[in-house]
Amino acid sequence: MFFFLLNLALADLGCICTTVPKAMHNSLWDTRTISYTGCAAQLFLLIFFLGSELSLLTIMCYDRYVSICKPLHYGTLLGSRACAHMAAAAWASAFLNALMHTANTFSLPLCHGNALGQFFCEIPQILKISCAKSYLRELQLLAVSACLFFGCFMFIVLSYVHIFRAVLRIPSEQGRHKAFSTCLPHLAVVSLFITTAVFSHLKPPSISSPSLDVTLSVLYSVVPPALNPLIYSLRNQELKAAVWKLMTGWFQKQ
């Protein structure tokens, strides 16, 4: 789990460093420009790190499933070599996915100007300024990516169904609490990441607006990577005690 947490932390750091520094630079210098090459690099890195995060969260779900449902086979199914292979597969698949989307998106002719209604480069905003007949290939790639996303989501749901069934069969309350405590941080991170991403891209057109689009983009590209370390760190008793002390001190001052 700690090996996968390290990989997840790298993906989170990459997500934030891809969008936030440029947005801060534009805000401080009161500009909204980005070069064509910079936009392509930003799109590639964002898709790469977000895809890696989804793959790693799916692998971490499998890790929880094996540790709770098949604990005697944990060393066999998730040895150091198997973990390294799964992490490498997650990064490699995300790299190929990002490369295909970036190459295909930036091969489209831009027929409706060059202004994006977003604080970073993303595929839906680029498609809005592309020719209507030219982005069918990109829509096909997006459909494939949506199927992969749905496959990961279903794998996580089915895994947790088996996990909760196994936990509820544990006779001792202490054992059930320990098993749940190992799953709740991962479940919270997955829920935050998936719900914000799904709502951002599948929201009804009737409620769409530039300000809402920017807010939702922040929710799925910045907020989950920023909160992931905190969510996982709350299992640390010393950190929880420090946070509780800070909160109680603040309320006493109020």
Image: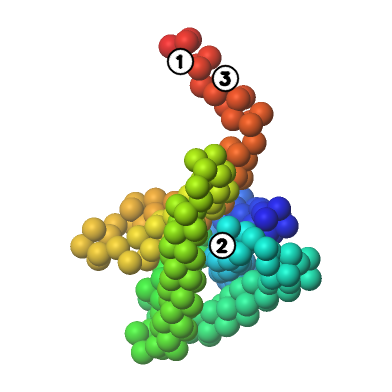
**In terms of sequence position, does the residue under pointer 2 or pointer 1 come before the other?**
2
Q: Which SS class for mark 1?
A: helix
Label pair 2/1, CB-CB below 8 angstroms = no
Q: How many marks?
A: 3
Other residues around mark 2 within 10 Å, as few (<14) / some (14–19) / many (≥20): some
The quarter of the picture where the C terminus appears is top left
Relative horizontal placement of residue 217, taking residue 76 as reference (left or right): left
Q: Which part of the image, by quadrant, shows the N terminus?
A: bottom right
Give the label, 2 or 3, closer to the camera: 2
Q: Amino acid at mark 1?
A: Phe
Mark 2 or mark 3: whose residue is earlier in sequence: 2
Q: Which residue is label 2 attached to?
A: 69
Q: How far apart in space, not on screen, are marks 3 and 1 (Cα)?
A: 10 Å
Q: Which residue is mark 1?
A: 251
Q: Nearest the camera: 128 or 176?
A: 176
In the rendered image, which residue does mark 3 sit on? 245
Judge whether residue 1 can be spotted in this image: yes
The residue under the point 67% across, 63% down is 72
| Structural distance between the alpha carbons of marks 2 and 3 | 37 Å
Could you tell me which residue is drawn at 64 percent across and 71 percent down? 90
Seen as rendered, the residue at the extreme left is 206
Q: Is residue 5 above or below residue 38?
A: above
Q: Amino acid at mark 3?
A: Lys
Residue for point 55% across, 48% down:
179
The residue type indicated by label 2 comes to Cys
Relative image position of residue 81 (x, y in whole percent):
78, 71
> Under tag 2, what secondary structure?
helix
Left or right of 38 on screen, residue 164: left
- Give x and y (percent) for residue 111: 40, 80
Q: Would you identify the image quadrant in which residue 238 lies?
A: top right
Residue drawn at x 38%, y 63% as measured from the top left: 198
